[in-house]
Amino acid sequence: MPRPLWSGAISFGLVTIPVKLMSATEDRSVHFHQVHTEDLGRVRVRKYCEAEDREVSAAEIGKGYEVSKDTLVAVTDEELEKMPLPTAKAIEIVAFVPAASIDPVRLSGDSYFLRYDGQVAAKPYALIARALARNTKVAVAKLAWHGRERLVLLRVRDGALVAHVLKWDDEVRDPSELAPKEAKVTDSEIDEALRLIDSMATDDISGYRDEYRQALEAVLEAKAEGRQPPEPSTEAEEPGDKVVDLMAALQESVRKAQAARAEDGGDAEVHEMPKKPAAGKPAKKTPVKKTAKKTATAKKSARRQRGA
């Protein structure tokens, strides 16, 4: 596990649970340096003071807030640390809400593991983790960190508490104006789209890989060894504005999805259960197929020949 980024306590009613916060994810992206293309010399970003026209060190750099075009107010780290926030060293749980009620757009992408801090914290930590695991609710809490108060969602994963940073209400834009107003969709097209959704449904997304990163690493490896980078196997089709038959496209997509699932060993077809007969009516006998009758007759002949 990486080193802790924050230490404090979870405030759960009158229960206090000392914890340490650590990053739950890691960046596996390929990163580049800025270089001078002529000689591959590193290009550095230097910090200059406009007033003195000179480069300044990190120790000389502080925070300033622009109250007007030509007026800045200096704010020190000490002043920020002394702000009277109850969540300065605590993750204060304020409510429990259904997990389905959290709009995914509010998730900022920052996720952290919470580790209990000390043996005394083990029991209350396990208590809240198991309580959350037994229902469909998640905890919503406040946390002051990195110069601002944050809203976080607490849930359980494999017995450990996970914190996901949430956007505040006023940080989420209203998307209503983006929805197409004039587009008309038929019920048949919606039904076909639902068939496509069902044919592509899965409970496990662990098998997906970052193909762009793999291709980029192959290019970098080839260049480092003085080889030509690998040629792309297929060319991606450029998206266009061409008009397509929506229903035909949906039906073909369903066919391909079902075929792909059949190749992976999944269920490609959905079979309807036989309908139960109405009360008072005898059940219809299922006619015996001729092929099955021929097979049974052939088996009886074979047994007679073996006994002869």
Image: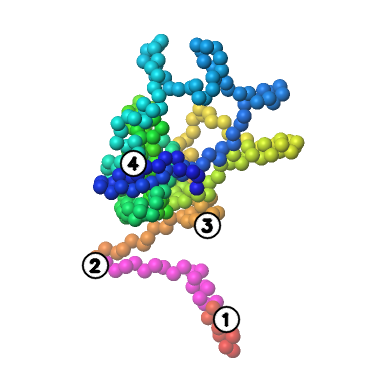
Residue 283 included in the magenta stretch of the image? yes
Whether residue 185 is visible here, answered yes or no, is no
Q: Position of residue 239 (x, y in %)?
A: 54, 31
Instruction: State the residue in front, 212 or 50.
Output: 50
Which is in the foreground here, disc 3 or disc 1?
Answer: 3
Q: Label 4 to label 1, Cα distance in Å? A: 78 Å
State the scheme by which the image is colored.
rainbow
Give the labeled residue for mark 2: 280
Give the labeled residue for mark 3: 265
Q: Which residues are magenta?
A: 280-298
Q: Does dot 4 land on a helix, a strand or a loop?
A: strand
Give the labeled residue for mark 4: 91
Q: Is residue 115 left or right of residue 275?
A: right
Residue 69 figure quarter: top left
Q: Does dot 1 land on a helix, a strand or a loop?
A: helix
**Amino acid on which disc 2 is placed:** Gly
Instruction: State the residue in front, 271 or 4.
Output: 4
Give the labeled residue for mark 1: 302
**Amino acid on which disc 4 is placed:** Ile
